[in-house]
């Protein structure tokens, strides 16, 4: 007769994942903290976030005359500063730690991490563009959207991608 798994077995199986997730997140965040602010502001944010966001804003609303300057989006209507943490790094580190910890083949992990990174980058760029327009036209909404709504939506998107990816991994095992 086969023994049925109980709740304790289920928790024991999840404990290593939870520990790996937390450790992975801490390691990634610790490495991120070591990156100099000047490198983030003047190079990384400028080329990967500020310039693309300015191009999208210009495409959507050419009359905004928005400019990309280091880590700033500026126009006559608003100035938006992109700083550490506004880059989607927290959501990215959470996803990468979860994928690294989940039992899957290395190829599946690379695909999951690569596509997840692209999803986070795209959503975060949309968030920055939206925040620019909110700052320019509805400044009272800026803090609630910036501090609460947008980060929650990004984490939900990460969770949904992770769940979808794990379902694909499970289906490939069968």
Image (cartoon, grey):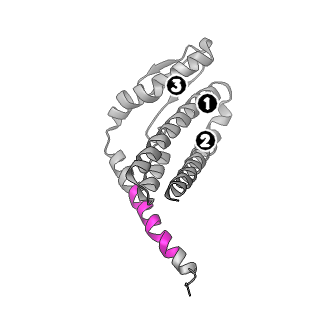
Instruction: Tell me where the magenta segment starts and ends, as one range.
Output: 11-24
Question: Sequence-wise, which precedes: disc 3 or disc 1?
Answer: 3
Q: Label 2's element?
A: helix
The numbered dot on residue 53 is 3
Residue at 49 percent of width and 58 percent of height: 173
Label 3: how many Cα within 10 Å (few below 14, some 14–19, many 20+): many
Give the distance between the C-alpha atoms of the residues marked 3 and 1, in whole angstroms. 10 Å
Magenta highlight: main SS: helix
In this view, the residue in front, 150 or 112, is 112
* On screen, residue 94 above or below 125: below
Question: Sequence-wise, which precedes: disc 3 or disc 2?
Answer: 3
Residue at 38 percent of width and 31 percent of height: 44
* On screen, residue 103 above or below 8: above
Residue at 63 percent of width and 39 percent of height: 145
Give the distance between the C-alpha atoms of the residues marked 2 and 1, in whole angstroms. 10 Å
**Image position, residue 68 (x, y; %):** 46, 20
In this view, the residue in front, 32 or 162, is 162
- Toward the bottom, the furthest residue is 1
The numbered dot on residue 13 is none
The numbered dot on residue 130 is 1
The numbered dot on residue 150 is 2
Label 1: how many Cα within 10 Å (few below 14, some 14–19, many 20+): some
With 109 as the anchor, is 2 left or right in this view?
right
Q: Looking at the figure, which quarter contains the N terminus?
A: bottom right
* On screen, residue 55 above or below 170: above
């Amino acid at each position: 007769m086969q023994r049925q798994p109980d709740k304790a077995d289920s928790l024991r199986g999840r404990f290593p994942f939870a520990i790996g997730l937390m450790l992975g997140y801490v390691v990634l965040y610790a490495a991120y903290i070591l990156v100099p602010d000047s490198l983030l502001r003047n190079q990384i944010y400028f080329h990967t976030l500020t310039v693309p966001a300015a191009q999208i804003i210009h495409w959507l609303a050419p009359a905004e005359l928005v400019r990309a300057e280091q880590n700033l989006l500026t126009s006559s209507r608003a100035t938006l500063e992109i700083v550490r943490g506004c880059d989607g790094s927290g959501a990215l580190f959470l996803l990468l730690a979860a994928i690294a910890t989940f039992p899957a083949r290395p190829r599946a992990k690379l695909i999951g991490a690569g596509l997840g990174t692209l999803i986070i980058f795209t959503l975060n760029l949309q968030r920055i563009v939206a925040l620019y327009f909110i700052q320019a036209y509805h400044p009272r909404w800026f803090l609630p959207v910036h501090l609460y709504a947008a980060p929650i939506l990004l984490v939900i998107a990460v969770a949904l991608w992770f769940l979808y990816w794990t379902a694909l991994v499970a289906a490939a095992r069968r």
